[in-house]
């Protein structure tokens, strides 16, 4: 719980700093590179934990099938839920409002 | 981007299997927390500097918020159904995996300490969600409806999949896509964190 609060607080601080910097003349294109490096390192470390666990390496194919099954159900559920929401709000197939 | 991430996960797995010493794996949990803090700060910075999120919301009205919440409900319904038919995966694990909403560089990292195997499932599921999303968007747009397309990639509907949605539908559906992606992305650290008890 404490770590989650830390994550949310840091994101919020980033937002506030970002909105203060919005009108500054400086170029902040390097922030994208920092993000990319952070992501690459994070997923590398995550991968190393998976690779270091021999029982997980042995069951990678069943993990892939599990992920595939979840993905199929999740995609079907999401499309179905948005379909119902769209009908309830009175949008047509092309996303236009029809009842006014 | 997706390619770079999949490659570095694969390199990490090989390094973890063959080279890296046990102490590295032991401290890796702390490294992940530090890395996530750095990443989330810069994600926040981007949102703050962009500054257009609030204007987008104002322009589209409250209705636009219905769709990301519908996507969450649909995702959880699908996760529960999958959890029930997959004996190897508990209901909580299935919900933790679904909670990534397609954000494959964040959700599995957050789940790494909760359970390494759930983290592995989460990574694969979230990558698949984005890839299948890209492939299915044009088909769903034609056969089911325009707004339904934004549900496929989940969080990625605000960046990687935004041009795909726009091409398959219309400019104003892209606004829906963007806002839905923003709401789902904001939800990921909270939903994953709460379900995994981070």
Image (cartoon, rainbow, N blue to C red):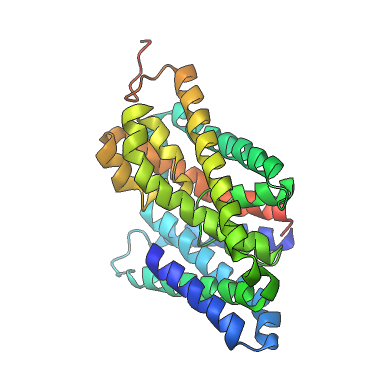
Left or right of residue B27: residue A42: left
Percent position of residue A78, x then y: 51, 36
Question: Can residue A52 be seen?
Answer: yes
**In the image, B113: left or right of B19?**
right
Quarter occupied by the C terminus of chain B: bottom right
Where A95 falls versus B33 (above or below)? Answer: above
Residue B160 appears at what percent x and percent y? 36, 53
* Residue at image point 72% right, 53% down: B88
Q: In which quarter of the image is residue B147?
A: top left
Q: Which quadrant is the N terminus of chain B positioned in? A: bottom left
Query: What's the residue at 39%, 20% (across, down)?
Result: A91
Most foreground residue, B113 or A58:
A58
Residue located 44% across and 46% down the image: B153
Tell me: residue B13, above or below residue B80.
below
x, y percentage for residue B175? 35, 38
Does residue A6 appear in this view?
A: no
Q: Nearer the viewer, residue A10 or B179?
A: B179
Residue found at x 53% / y 46%: A71
């Amino acid at each position: 719980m404490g770590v989650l609060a830390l994550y949310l607080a840091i994101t919020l601080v980033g937002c506030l700093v970002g909105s203060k910097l919005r009108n500054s003349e400086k170029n902040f294109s390097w922030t994208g590179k920092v993000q990319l490096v952070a992501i690459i390192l994070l997923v590398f470390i995550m991968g190393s934990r998976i690779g270091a666990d021999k029982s997980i390496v042995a069951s990678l194919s069943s993990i892939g099938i599990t992920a595939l099954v979840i993905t199929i159900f999740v995609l079907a559920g999401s499309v179905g839920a948005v379909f119902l929401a769209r009908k309830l709000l009175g949008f047509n197939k092309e996303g236009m409002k029809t009842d006014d | 981007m997706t390619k770079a991430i999949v490659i570095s996960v694969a390199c990490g797995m090989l390094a973890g299997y063959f080279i890296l010493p046990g102490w590295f794996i032991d401290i890796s949990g702390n490294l992940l927390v530090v890395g996530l803090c750095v990443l989330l700060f810069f994600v926040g910075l981007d949102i703050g500097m962009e500054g257009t999120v609030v204007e987008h919301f104002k322009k589209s009205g409250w209705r636009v918020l219905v769709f990301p919440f519908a996507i969450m409900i649909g995702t959880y319904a699908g996760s529960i159904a999958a959890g029930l038919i997959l004996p190897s995966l508990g209901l909580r694990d299935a919900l933790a995996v679904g909670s990534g909403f397609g954000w494959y560089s964040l959700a599995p990292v957050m789940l790494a300490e909760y359970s390494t195997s759930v983290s592995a499932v989460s990574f694969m599921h979230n990558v698949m969600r984005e890839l299948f999303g890209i492939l299915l968007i044009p088909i769903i747009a034609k056969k089911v409806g325009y707004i339904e397309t934004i549900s496929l990639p989940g969080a990625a509907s605000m960046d990687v999949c935004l041009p795909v949605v726009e091409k398959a539908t219309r400019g104003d559906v892209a606004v829906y896509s963007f806002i839905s992606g923003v709401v789902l992305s904001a939800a990921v650290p909270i939903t994953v964190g709460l379900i995994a008890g981070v």
